[in-house]
Image (cartoon, rainbow, N blue to C red):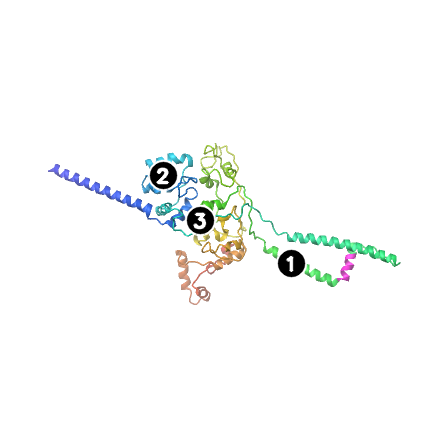
Amino acid sequence: MRKGNSMVAYTGFRAFRNILTACLLLMATHAVADIWEEGDIEAGQALFNANCASCHKVTNEVLAAPGLGGIADRWGATDELLIQWIQNPQGAAESGDKYIKSLVDRYVPTYGWMTAQAVSPDDVKNIMAYVQNPPDAAPVADTGSDCVTVDELPIVENSDSSGVWFLMLLVLFLIIAMAAAGVNRSLTNASLEKEGETLLEDATYSSRVRNWTWDNRVAVTLIGLFFVAYGAVLGYQGLMRVGVVEGYKPNQPVKFIHSVHVCENEVDCKYCHHSAYESKHAGIPSTNVCMNCHKAVKKGRRYGETEIAKIYDAIGFDPTSGTYVDGSGQNGYTSPQDTYDGEPIRWNKVHNLPDHVFFSHQQHVVVGGLQCQNCHGDVETYTVGRVAKVDDINQLVDKYPGLIELSKPTLTMGWCIECHNKAEIDLASSGYYEDIHHRLKDNLRGNEELRKYMEDEKITVKELGGWECAKCHY
């Protein structure tokens, strides 16, 4: 009887195990289907451009790492390991999975470890959905970009020299006038001597000028008023240009071409300037960020190996062997006992605000939702970075929805307060703004200023205190 019960129990256990296994396999199959088929293609494109496009292409072509074309058919591990491989490659390798080990053995010696990406499982699902729908098939709005570079060479624009030319002409006129006065005096004395009259007394040039000025005092007064007014206008224009640096485009130690990286290779601006999300400054990319791609991309299509070699010299990388030279360390970091003495790349600052001005990229990018083009212009057509002119930015209004058309010169106070006056706030975008909205409505009665703000049912940055001095000035 006990043996029969045991057999029944064992048979029941096996049936339960088989059912459980089938359920787990079904769940795994469903999860895989989810991660490969149910993502958002448009969201995946944005995530791919921000996190993956600097190293991977959606085709089989190698950029700085193997292409991702056909990855759904090639991936030989679970979806959980795929997510872990993207979030923490070394951690996925420690799982002991044979397929992951084959990836490490095949690619890490050549391309190095993939940088861990701060993405969620849902983000991975969206990325995989986009990867399986290449750009020519993905239903994503066309930006209208043709990857045309508008400025081939970095140039520092010369300042207006009209004032110098005017001064030179004025000096030349005075010399001619003094020479003419001397000739006229000589001819007058010759005529007087011929007629037997008294010659003009010898006098210095200053005496002659004083006498001539007095004799022609009305004309001299009018001319003097003209020059005073002209000087005042020039002085005012000069003072109004203080701090205005539109068009400034300095040479850089490396001929970096934004159009190749941003437009042709679709590298998101914030992949390199990643601190724009979380800091006051957008930051200059470290050489390690450059090496994420250029450990494999060793030759550029325009400058060949010349400019990329400057990156290798700075970080201590031997492109021939694909390894870092002695003393530089795996990631370019050095310790006191290391011997590599490469010089870092010293970039020339392009955008600069006075020390008494506070500006936070994080506040404008994360909270305000501004695009890089709002302030920096059509970066994907640039070579080196430059200060965009306000007219150039205004031409992008149709190309980049949400861009605000302004009239004041870029990086000036008038430019900032004009933007704050026009930029609207979505009061439902966060709990912070929702709270402000409720307080505005609660205080609307009896407050004429708030009632005026709410008449058009819009709230601007100015109306939330964006014109308060302490918002921008310490």
Please report whichever mark, 2 or 1, sits nearer to the chain's N-terminal start. Answer: 2
The image's mark for residue 91 is: 2
Q: Say what amino acid the circle numbered 2 marks.
A: Gly
Please report whichever mark, 3 or 2, sits nearer to the chain's N-terminal start. Answer: 2
What residue did someone put label 1 on? 232
Looking at the rendered structure, the secondary structure element under dot 2 is helix
The Cα–Cα distance between marks 1 and 3, rounded to whole angstroms, is 45 Å
Highlighted magenta segment, given as a residue range: 208-216
Q: Quadrant of residue 58?
A: top left
Q: Say what amino acid the circle numbered 3 marks.
A: Tyr
Residue 163 drawn at (x, y percent): 65, 53
Do the residues under discs 1 and 3 have CB atoms within 8 angstroms? no
Residue 352 drawn at (x, y percent): 53, 49
77 vs 213, nearest the viewer: 77
Residue 50 drawn at (x, y percent): 42, 46
Residue farthest to the right? 196
Q: Say what amino acid the circle numbered 1 marks.
A: Ala
74 is higher (above) or lower (below) than 402: above
What residue did someone put label 3 on? 277
Looking at the rendered structure, the secondary structure element under dot 3 is helix
12 vs 391, nearest the viewer: 391
Looking at the rendered structure, the secondary structure element under dot 1 is helix
Looking at the image, residue 203 sits to the left or right of residue 102; the answer is right
